[in-house]
């Protein structure tokens, strides 16, 4: 290929391996706590590998799946169900590993194709859309077959240009991952301080002087939201108020929403403006007990309870309390058709109420940690937007890359 020239190739022409695995005999019951990683579709997110729910199998089970052994820099692609066409690479720390039947391995021939370029190429919006279209044809369940993948066409430049493009995009993802790791550390530090002040060595039956048992409603006000009528789509046009759904609660700061509503929606629904730094909890359905902190003034739907902070009992205190007691909130959920906790359950939830001086001392120590977390999340959001705007232009060849790799 002439330097700088682009051409279309089928994946079978530039990949050493395209194939999926299987679930070991015995299914979930056969998994062990430690061993060889078994990658399932829930571990494959766009751009990033998730260790949540990562299964492990024995060496004997892994031997039976030796034909789908993952290697360094392999690209993973979900090939069935609602998560079809999600793409990432597996970090080395999770190797050795195998994949089940819902995940395909795409192993680039490195003499022709940069593995990271392959990943970003499959994440390019038009290629992603093509994969989703193929997956939706001819079956009740979305699926990508081996034949579809082998024949899938991508556009590639010469190998040095592929490497430079991958380097540019990887720099963004590297910084995003560093920020996420930093936030994980900050969360652990805040958690340790909360436990030191309000959990460790504390006997609820023999509280220190000035401490007492009480209810959340005694220290913080609560409210919930509403959903503007979907029959009037104009409510969601030109929106200026963030509108949070329970599926968006993320155990940390919420700094953006999928939808926004306008003044008319606010006036014609039970949605209301909730102050920044309110702590929000999901009350219904599969997300019951999920929580977050408002990183801005926002509205929410009726499935969310907002606990409004005040100077005496700030968000840093109530957030960590909710986090520590998430399992107990879920245990309080009732209802056979749809699990739910009511606003009354949250208001009446028992809490150790420390002296305000102690709460303020704790708040002063952890506030900077929370501020760093929020700033890191905002930087992540900015980096993601930049990466996502650059990606299609780089993969389409609209932006000419320099000889020296660019860093984010």
Image: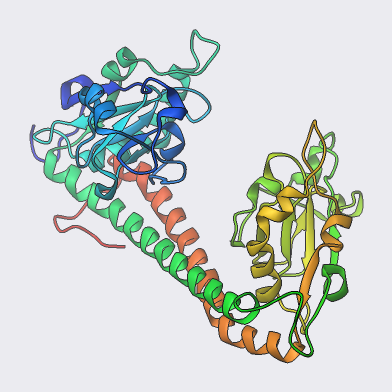
In front here: 396 or 30? 30
Which residue appears at 46% of the width and 24% of the height? 132
In front here: 123 or 63? 63
* Residue 360 x/y as whole percent: 69, 88
Q: Judge from the rendering whether residue 391 lies leftward or rightward of residue 287; answer left or right.
A: left
From the viewer's perspective, is residue 189 above or below residue 168? below
Q: Judge from the rendering whether residue 299 lies leftward or rightward of residue 194; answer left or right.
A: right
Colour basis: rainbow
From the viewer's perspective, is residue 157 above or below residue 68? below
Residue 241 seen in this snapshot: no
* Quadrant in the picture for the N terminus: top left
From the viewer's perspective, is residue 371 above or below residue 143? below
Which residue appears at 26% of the width and 29% of the height? 62
* Quadrant in the picture for the C terminus: bottom left
Which residue appears at 64% of the width and 90% of the height? 361
* Residue 74 x/y as whole percent: 24, 37
Q: Judge from the rendering whether residue 334 lies leftward or rightward of residue 55; answer left or right.
A: right
Total tally of numbered discs in the picture: 0
* Residue 367 x/y as whole percent: 59, 81
Q: Judge from the rendering whether residue 125 lies leftward or rightward of residue 332; answer left or right.
A: left
* Residue 137 x/y as whole percent: 48, 12
From the viewer's perspective, is residue 269 above or below residue 191? above
In front here: 404 or 380? 380
Residue sitting at the far top = 138
For residue 211, what is the image quadrant? bottom right
């Amino acid at each position: 290929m002439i330097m700088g020239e682009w051409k279309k190739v089928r994946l079978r022409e530039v990949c050493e391996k395209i194939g999926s695995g299987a679930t070991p005999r015995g299914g979930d019951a056969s998994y062990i706590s430690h061993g060889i990683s078994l990658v399932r579709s829930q571990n494959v997110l766009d751009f990033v590998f998730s260790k949540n729910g990562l299964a492990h199998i024995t060496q004997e089970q892994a031997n039976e799946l030796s034909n789908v052994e993952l290697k360094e820099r392999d690209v993973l692609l979900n090939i069935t169900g609602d998560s079809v066409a999600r793409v990432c690479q597996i970090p080395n720390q999770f190797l050795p590993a195998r994949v089940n039947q819902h995940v395909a391995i795409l192993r680039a021939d490195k003499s022709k194709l940069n593995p990271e370029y392959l990943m970003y190429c499959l994440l390019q919006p038009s290629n992603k859309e093509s994969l989703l279209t193929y997956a939706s044809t001819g079956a009740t369940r979305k699926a990508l077959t081996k034949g579809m993948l082998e024949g899938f066409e991508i556009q590639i430049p010469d190998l040095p240009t592929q490497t430079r493009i991958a380097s540019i995009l990887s720099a963004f993802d590297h910084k995003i991952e560093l920020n996420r790791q930093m936030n994980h550390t900050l969360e652990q530090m805040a958690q340790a301080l909360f436990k030191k002040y309000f959990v460790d060595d504390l006997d609820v039956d023999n509280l220190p002087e000035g401490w007492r048992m009480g209810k959340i409603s005694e220290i913080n006000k609560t409210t919930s939201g509403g959903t503007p009528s979907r029959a009037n789509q104009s409510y969601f046009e030109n929106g200026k108020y963030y509108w949070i759904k329970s599926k968006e609660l993320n155990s940390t700061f919420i700094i953006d929403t999928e939808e926004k509503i306008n003044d008319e929606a606010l006036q014609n629904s039970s949605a209301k403006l909730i102050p920044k730094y309110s702590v929000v909890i999901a009350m219904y359905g599969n997300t019951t007990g999920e929580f977050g902190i408002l990183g801005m003034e926002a509205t929410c739907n009726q499935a969310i309870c907002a606990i409004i902070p005040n100077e005496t009992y700030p968000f840093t205190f109530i957030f960590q309390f909710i986090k520590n007691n998430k399992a107990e909130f879920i245990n309080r959920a009732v209802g056979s058709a749809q699990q739910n906790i009511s606003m009354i359950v949250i208001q009446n939830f028992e809490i150790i109420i420390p002296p305000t001086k102690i709460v303020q001392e704790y708040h002063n120590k952890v506030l900077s940690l929370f501020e760093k977390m929020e700033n890191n999340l905002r930087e992540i959001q900015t980096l993601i937007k930049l990466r996502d705007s650059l990606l299609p232009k780089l993969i389409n060849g609209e932006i000419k890359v320099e000889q020296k790799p660019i860093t984010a």
